[in-house]
Amino acid sequence: MHNKHAKLQSLADEIISQNVCPELAQSATQLVMGDGNPDASIVLIGEAPGKNEDEQGLPFVGASGRFLDEMLAAAGLVRNDIYITNIVKYRPPNNRDPSPSEKQAFWPYLARQLEIIDPTVIVTLGRHSMEFFLPKAKIGQVHGHAVRKRVAFHDGKEHEWLIMPLYHPAAALYNGSMRQTLIDDFLGVTQLIDK
């Protein structure tokens, strides 16, 4: 367990020393690496930190994060049962969407983060993180449906994971009917693990 903590910490140090996305790093308060249990069987991936995340150095601590906690609670889980991160680890200015080149720059680090944790299921939250695993998919059609996917990583090893695309929790903040969809989809994730 501690070994994974140490590996994740050295990965974070490397992002800083390699000066990944220097413009983003300059405008952000800090790197937001991830949070939760490095031995988790479920990893949730969002797109990029927002204002609250940037201030606290933790992912999903704003309004979306509160709804995410509700989703977890519905499944009988708390944050320490899962691991949560974003593709892009610095807050984009004014919460704009991360650009394709920013996502590309962080992708190898996300890949290594996933290798360290080695979850059973990867839950993508929203379109940005889904695109990396399921490039041609449309979220409206595939949300809540798990896909087995082989992903070739930097070390040339292929990893096979269950990818479960969900809408981003922020979607539920603007659209009440999405709340139930997200909760139902997330309950599907925990059923996969139980199998």
Image: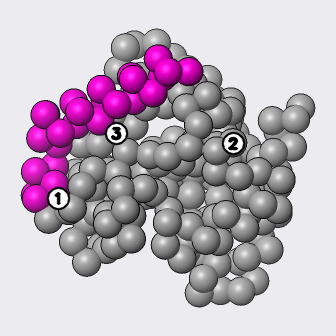
Q: Name the residue under label 3.
A: 107
Q: Which residue is drawn at 56% across and 43% down?
A: 36
Whether residues under marks 3 and 1 lie with C-beta atoms below 8 angstroms apart, the answer is no
Q: Where is residue 136 in the image (x, y as percent from the top left)?
A: 52, 50
Q: Which residue is drawn at 75% across and 83% down?
A: 177
The local secondary structure at tag 1 comes to: helix
In the foreground, 125 or 28 = 28
Q: Name the residue under label 1.
A: 24
How packed mark 3 is, by other alpha carbons closer than 10 Å (few <14, some 14-19, many 20 or more), is: some
Residue type pointed to by label 1? Leu
> Is residue 87 found left or right of 179 in the rendered image?
left
Q: Position of residue 162 (x, y in %)?
A: 68, 35
Q: Name the residue under label 2.
A: 81
Residue numbers of the magenta segment: 1-26
> Is residue 51 found left or right of 75 in the rendered image?
left
Q: Position of residue 68 (x, y in %)?
A: 64, 64
- Is residue 140 placed above or below 8 in the rendered structure? below
Which tag, 2 or 1, sits closer to the chain's start? 1
Q: Which quarter of the figure has residue 147? A: top right
Residue type pointed to by label 2? Asp
